[in-house]
Image (cartoon, grey):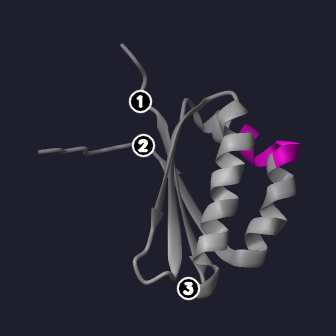
Amino acid sequence: MATQPTILVSVLKTEPARQAALIALLKQNIETVIRRLDGWKAARLIAAQDGASVVIYSEWETPAAVQAMRGDPRMVDYFPRIAELASLDSIMGSTVLSETR
């Protein structure tokens, strides 16, 4: 039986004029760093229609994989660049309900 992934949801608040630059930076980070990290499974970027935020939904094998990502030197290099464009708040957990039609 497969174990349930660890979910990391990050909400980045930004100015609408900066949303496109933030999305470009996040895409670059996913393509050049995140994809190469052990334990990464999936990522989605969701852009608010009003331009004021971006949500990152990512799936990881374990909470330890999330912690390793946060401490990876390549990620540490990205954090100040992200902070120039947005504030960041994250939660880590597991899915308790998932429904589709």
Residue 25 percent location from the top left of the image: 70, 61
Q: Camera-side residue: 4 or 53?
A: 53
Q: Quadrant of residue 46?
A: bottom left
- Asked if residue 33 is positioned above or below residue 53 in the image, the reply reads above
Across the whole image, how many numbered discs are drawn on residues?
A: 3
Distance (Cα) linking label 1 and label 3: 35 Å
Q: Is residue 100 above or below residue 50?
A: above
Q: Which residue is mark 3?
A: 16
Residue in the image at 65% along x and 46% along y: 30
Q: Residue furthest top?
A: 1
Q: Disc 3 residue type? A: Pro
Name the residue: 79% across, 49% down: 75
Which residue carries the number 2 mark? Answer: 94
Q: Tell me which corner region of the image, top left, top right, bottom left or bottom right, holds residue 71.
A: top right
Write the start and end of the magenta stretch as one range.
67-74
Tell me which label, 3 or 2, sits earlier in the chain: 3
Indicate the secondary structure of the residue bearing disc 2: loop
**Along the line of sight, the residue nearer the viewer: 55 or 68:** 55
**First in sequence: mark 1 or mark 2?**
1
Residue type highlighted by circle 2: Ser
Write down the residue under mark 1.
4
